[in-house]
Image (cartoon, rainbow, N blue to C red):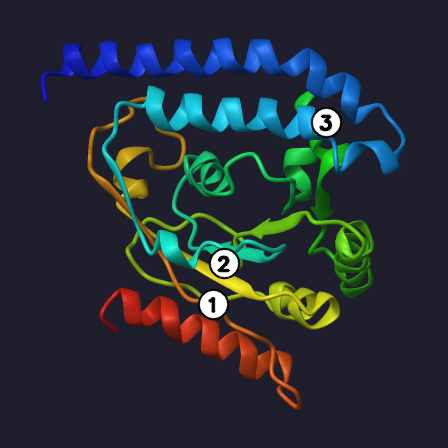
């Protein structure tokens, strides 16, 4: 694609997303200041976050196809996806269509001014620097959603990879599945790293394909390691390996 046209498309996307964020930020910041019992089930907050997700997905002008829509859960679940790009976040968020959801995200993002405050108040910061901190993060996630209908959202690879490989998974989602009794819905994302790789400026119009798999249920007597292997094997299968 012509570089100038690509530049115009990219600027258009940034403008659309910036407008959506500007509209959403004040009400989301206000809601984030509320006590916990009024934050996590707040439909107004999730309406605005869904607005931002849709602005990013549609405003990117990138063709997105979704396979396996019939597998989308009607009840609270845990969504896990491979991670290639910052664009993965609105894509995965887009799939829940405004339903309440809680992200598990790395501690470094919590340090971003203003955004970090809202993210910390509405989601769960995961700190991998020590086992006790990591377990504390998972316990907090279980405590938040156990009496709510919020989905849990995370990228089990723990980082972004654009080499086309599925990397090792952290065990956090298995612990969450066991602790909450919720099914795990895998989402395989294709070409997102081509569209918007880490630290890129341009948003390239490669077609994106999302595949939603059937749910994985933690079986009685199954270990976290065995459960992780089952889910990881599904992702490997999607890559043809």
* Mark 2–mark 1 distance (CA, rounded to whole Å): 6 Å
* Mark 2–mark 3 distance (CA, rounded to whole Å): 24 Å
Quick check: marks 2 and 3 in contact, CB under 8 Å?
no
SS at mark 1 in the image: loop
Residue 96 in picture, x, y percent from top left: 51, 42
Quick check: marks 3 and 1 in contact, CB under 8 Å?
no
Q: On residue 168, which mark appears?
A: 1
Q: Residue at x 58, y 10 (%)?
A: 23
Quick check: marks 2 and 1 in contact, CB under 8 Å?
yes
The number of callouts visible is 3
SS at mark 2 in the image: loop
Which one is nearer the viewer's eye here, 60 or 40? 40
Residue 89 in picture, x, y percent from top left: 48, 38
Q: Residue at x 81, y 54 (%)?
A: 147
Outermost residue, left side: 2
Instruction: Residue 32: name its quadrant.
Output: top right
Instruction: Residue 240: name its quadrant.
Output: bottom left
Q: Is 48 situated left or right of 124 in this image?
A: left
Tell me the crowding category of disc 1: few under 14, some 14 to 19, or many 20 or more residues within 10 angstroms, Cα based. few
Q: Is 219 situated left or right of 12 in this image?
A: right
């Amino acid at each position: 694609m012509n570089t100038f046209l690509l530049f115009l498309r990219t600027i258009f996307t940034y403008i659309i997303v910036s407008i959506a964020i500007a509209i959403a930020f004040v009400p989301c910041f206000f809601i984030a200041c509320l006590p916990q019992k009024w934050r996590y089930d707040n439909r107004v907050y999730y309406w605005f976050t869904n607005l931002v997700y849709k602005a990013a997905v549609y405003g990117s002008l990138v063709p997105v196809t979704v396979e396996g829509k019939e597998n989308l859960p009607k009840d609270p679940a845990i969504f896990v996806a491979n991670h290639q790009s910052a664009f993965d976040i609105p894509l995965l968020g887009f799939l829940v269509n405004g339903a309440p959801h809680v992200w598990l995200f790395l501690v470094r993002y919590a340090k971003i001014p203003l955004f970090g405050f809202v993210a910390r108040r509405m989601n769960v910061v995961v700190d991998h620097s020590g086992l006790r901190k990591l377990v504390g993060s998972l316990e907090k996630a279980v405590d938040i959603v156990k009496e709510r209908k919020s989905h849990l959202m995370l990228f089990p690879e723990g980082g972004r990879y654009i080499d086309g490989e599925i990397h090792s998974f952290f065990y956090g989602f298995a612990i969450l599945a066991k602790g909450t009794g919720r099914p795990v819905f895998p989402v395989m994302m294709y070409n997102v790293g081509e569209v918007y790789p880490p630290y890129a400026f341009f948003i390239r119009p490669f077609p994106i394909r999302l595949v939603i798999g059937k749910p994985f249920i933690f079986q009685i007597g199954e270990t976290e390691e065995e459960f992780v292997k089952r889910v990881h094997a599904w992702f490997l299968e999607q890559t043809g390996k």
